[in-house]
Amino acid sequence: MKTRYTEEHEWITQNDDVFTIGITDYAQEQLGDIVFVQLPEIDSEINKDEELSCIESVKAAGEVQSPISGIVLEVNNDLDGEPELINDSAEDLGWLCKIKCTDHSEFNSLMDAHQYQAFLRQLS
């Protein structure tokens, strides 16, 4: 399983042809206590950099853009009743959705963990 990251603080993990997407721990810290998550529709087609989800916190609302193009296969329904799962486990239990990728080169062009950590150091 490979994980990649975006400059907008989304993470994406590849498991064969299924890609799981969420926001990073850094992103959830910036948002604060998350109170609502709008998830995409299953079977919807998403293009890279299009809005995938909207996350609302006590401080702000933010769009999550899709790091790759694909078709939504599954959403994390646990977030309906427990949006705080993202705060508690942003890069594991707080995943947003799973999609089938239509362009693998988009995934390969994203930052790996070392590049993302270096990117975060530039922000501080």
Image (tube, grey):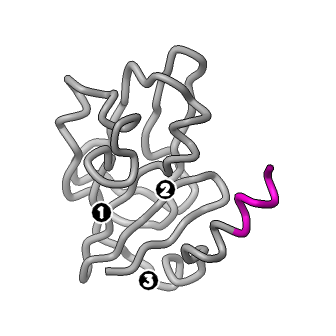
Taking the magenta stretch, the answer to whether it contains residue 123 is yes
Describe residue 21's horizontal placement relative to residue 49 as left or right: left
Q: CA distance from mark 2 to mark 1?
A: 10 Å
Which residue is found at the position 34% from the left and 44% from the top? Answer: 89
| Labels 3 and 1: the sequence-earlier one | 1
Residue receiving disc 1 = 99
Question: Which part of the image, by quadrant, shows the N terminus?
Answer: bottom left
| Badge 1 density bin: few <14, some 14–19, many ≥20, Cα 10 Å | many
Most foreground residue, 110 or 91: 91
Which residue is found at the position 46% from the left and 33% from the top? Answer: 54
Taking the magenta stretch, the answer to whether it contains residue 72 is no
Q: Residue furthest top?
A: 58
| Labels 2 and 3: the sequence-earlier one | 2
Most foreground residue, 45 or 113: 113
Describe residue 110's horizontal placement relative to residue 97 as left or right: right
What amino acid is labelled 3 in the image?
A: His
Label 3 SS:
helix
Q: Magenta: predominant secondary structure element?
A: helix
Magenta residues span 118-124
What amino acid is labelled 2 in the image?
A: Ser
Say which mark, if any, is on residue 104.
3
What amino acid is labelled 1 in the image?
A: Ile
Is there CB contact under 8 Å for labels 2 and 1?
Answer: yes
Q: CA distance from mark 3 to mark 1?
A: 12 Å
Label 2 SS:
loop
- Number of residue marks: 3
| Badge 3 density bin: few <14, some 14–19, many ≥20, Cα 10 Å | some
Residue receiving disc 2 = 66
